Image (cartoon, grey):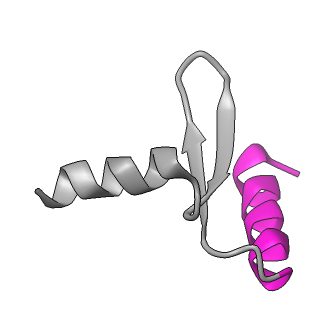
Amino acid sequence: MNTKKELKEIKDFLESEKIGKIFIDKRPNGIILIETTETKKYQSRVCKKVT
């Protein structure tokens, strides 16, 4: 199974568990961050893009 498909399955599972929307950030150095939209980091990132 490739990484993209595995991440989609993880995202779908977490969202089905009523955790909220999931944000997955794949970085070039191999690090994958999985955050919910409820975290302050995500909310501030969205606010910066909007303003």
Seen in the image, is 33 located left or right of residue 17? left
Seen in the image, is 20 located left or right of residue 25? right
Image quadrant for the C terminus? bottom left
| Residue at x-position 48% and y-position 44% | 41
| Residue at x-position 55% and y-position 63% | 37
Furthest-left residue in this view: 51
| Residue at x-position 72% and y-position 64% | 8
Furthest-top residue in this view: 29
Instruction: Name the residue nearer the viewer: 20 or 24.
Output: 20
Instruction: Name the residue nearer the viewer: 23 or 42.
Output: 42
Seen in the image, is 46 located left or right of residue 27? left
Instruction: Name the residue nearer the viewer: 25 or 1.
Output: 25
Q: Is residue 15 above or below residue 2?
A: below
Q: Is residue 19 above or below residue 8?
A: below
Determine which quarter of the picture holds residue 50. Answer: bottom left
Instruction: Name the residue nearer the viewer: 22 or 43.
Output: 43
The image shows residue 33 at horizontal and vertical percentages of: 65, 39
State yes or no: residue 11 in magenta.
Answer: yes
Furthest-front residue in this view: 40
| Residue at x-position 60% and y-position 72% | 21
State yes or no: residue 41 in magenta.
Answer: no
The image shows residue 49 at horizontal and vertical percentages of: 20, 53
Q: Main secondary structure of the magenta part?
A: helix
The image shows residue 43 at horizontal and vertical percentages of: 42, 56
Numbered range of the magenta stretch: 1-17
Determine which quarter of the picture holds residue 36. Answer: bottom right
Please count the marks in the image. 0
Q: Is residue 25 above or below residue 16?
A: above
